[in-house]
Amino acid sequence: METKDKIKDILVGILKIKPDELKEDGKLYDDIGVDSTEAVEIITALEKAFNVELGDKEITKFSSINDIEKIIQAKLNK
Amino acid sequence: MNNRKVAVTGLGIVTPSGIGRRQFWANIKAGRSFIKDIKRFDASKYPSHIAGQIDDLEEYSHLSPRLLRKIDVFSHMAMIASELALKEAEIDIQKEDPDLLGIFLGNAIGGWLYAETELRDLYIEGRKGVSPYMASAWFPAAPQGQVSIYYGIKGFSKTVIADRAGSLMAIGYARKTLNKGKLNMILAGGMEAPVTPYALLCCNTYGALSKNNANPQSAYRPFDKKRDGFVIGEGAGIVIMEGVERALKRGVKIAALISGYGTTCDGKDRIEPDSSGKELSRAINMALLDAGITPADIDYISLDGLAYDIWDKSEARAIEAVFGNRAGDIPVSCPKSMFGNLLGASGAVDLIITILAMEHNLIPPTLNLDEPDPAGLNYVRGKAKEHEINKALVISRGRGGINSVLVVERGKEQ
C-alpha cells in the first residue's frame, strides 16, 4: 500500500470519518476539525504503522496529508 | 429570596428499566425487576455479580462514532439523558444565552471502563499504548465537560462528589444557584457506570452488596427482614431546572417544583451512618423549613433504602423522629429495588420517579419487601398504589453519613 493511502486509512480509523472527507492538501484542523489530542493519537498510530519516531512538533493538527507523507517518506528513505 | 420554588420542565432518564420517560414509567409502575447476572465480563468470582444493566444504549445515542471513542460510557449516559431532558423542556439551545446556562451533576466513582482499559494498555504496551483521551475521559467531572462542550454551556457549573448523595445534592445546589439569579437554566442530575471489572470490585469491597446471586430479581430487598445488601445499577437522571416565571413565560409544562433542600453529615464513621438517624432527621427538618411547610404536608417519601441493617433502621428512625404519629400513615417506597442503586445518580432518578408518581397519582412499589423491618412505616410494596401526591420528600444518603433531602411539589402555577 502506498504511504499516502496508509496515512488516510489511519486517519479514517481514528476519526471515524468517510475517506472522501479527507483532502490531501488541507490542514487537518481546518478540514476535519482535528484537535490537539486527536493529533497525539494520530502521531502514535503513524509511529506504530511506519515504525518511525516522530518528534513533538513534526506533525501537528495544522499539518496536511501531503505534509505528513513527506515527513514519513523522508524518514523511511533514510 | 433564596428559598423560592424552582421549576422542573424536562426529565431525562437512562436506566436499566428504560430510556425515556414512557418506557421507564411503564416498567416502574408495573413493578418489574431489571436486575440480572453480569455477563459483559466474567464476574462469576465476585461475591456479588448481579446488577441493573443497560444493554441498548447505542440505540438511543445521538453522538458520532468519533466522539464516542473519546468518552466513557458514564458521559454517554449523561449526554443521552441531557438530550431527552432538553427535548422535553422544549429548549432551543441556540436561542439561549450560553453564559447563563449551567450544568450541575453528581457522580461517585468516575468512568472506570475507559480508565481500566487504558491502564491495562499502559502496563502491557507502555505509555504510547494509552489513548490521549484517557486523561479527559475517566474523571468524575468528565460528563459535565462533555455536555457543556456539546451544547455550548458557558455559565457557572459544578460536579458534586458526595458518594450516593451526589446527584440529589447537585439538584439542591442548582436550585440555590437559580435563586441567586446567577443563571437562567440548569441541567441537573447525575450519572454512574459501575458495571465494570474494577468498579464492581470496589463496590464489592465496600461490603454492602447483596450476595444473593442465585436470585437476581429478589436480591435487592430494602426494609425487608431478609435483606443482605443492595444491588448496583448503571444509568443517568438529568432534569431541566429554571425559574418558575421563566417557565411560565415560555409556556412550557412545569413537571414539578423543587421547593426545599437540606443536607447534613453524621460525622461518626468512615463508612456507616449514625445509627440514631439524628442527622438525617435534621436534614429532613431543614428541607421542610426551607420549603416553608410542615411534616403534615408531606404525602409521599422516596426512601434511600440501602437494604443494609444500620442504613434502613437509621432511615426509619429519622422518619419517625420527624413525623411522629404520622410516620405510619405517609406512604413510603424504594422503587430502585427494581433496577439497582445508581450510586451517584440514584437521587436524581428517585426525584424523576417521584415526579412521575405525582403526575400519575400512583406510588411505585418497593420490590421484595415481604416482612418489613423495621415495621411501623407505611411501605408501598409489591404493587403500585393509587395515591394523590402534592408534596413529597426524596431522601438520598452517602457513605460515612452524608444526608441529602429534597422537597418536591406538584407542578402547578404559583
Image: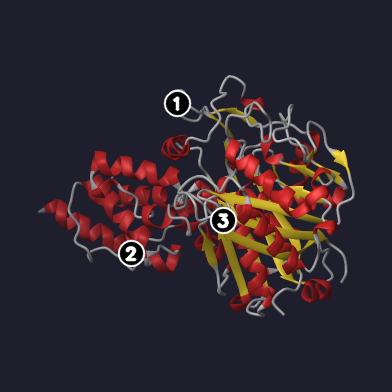
Indicate the quadrant containing the C terminus of chain B: top left, top right, bottom left or bottom right: bottom right
Colouring scheme, one of rainbow, by chain, secondary structure, one colour = secondary structure
Numbered marks: total: 3
Q: Chain of mark 2?
A: A
Please report the residue visible at 74 percent of the width from the left and 42 percent of the height from the top: B24
Residue B306 % position (x, y): 61, 40
Q: Secondary structure at mark 1?
A: loop
| In-image side of B223 versus B116 (left or right) | right
Amino acid at the residue labelled 2:
Ser
Mark 2 crowd level (few <14, some 14–19, many ≥20, 10 Å Cα)? many
Residue wearing tag 3: B166
Q: Quadrant of the N terminus of chain B?
A: bottom right
Q: Dot 1, how many residues are within 10 Å of its Cα: few (below 14), some (14-19), or many (20+)?
A: few
Question: Where's residue B364, x and y in %?
Answer: 79, 40
Chain assignment, label 3: B
- Between marks 1 and 2 in the image, the one whose residue lies nearer the viewer: 1
Q: What amino acid does circle 1 point to?
A: Asp
Marks 3/1 in contact by CB < 8 Å: the verdict is no
Instruction: Specify few, some or many for label 3: CA neighbours under 10 Å numbering under 14, 14-19, or 20 or more.
Output: many
Whole-angstrom CA distance, mark 3 to mark 1, is 29 Å
**Would you name the residue on which mark 1 appears?**
B42
Labels 1 and 2 positioned on one and the same chain = no
Image position of B252 with respect to B77: above or below: below
- Upstream in sequence: badge 3 or badge 1: 1
Whether residue B62 is visible to the viewer of this picture, yes or no, is no
The residue pinned by badge 2 equals A64
Mark 3 vs mark 1: in front = 3
Q: Residue drawn at (9%, 54%), measured in percent from left and top?
A: A78
Amino acid tagged 3: Gly
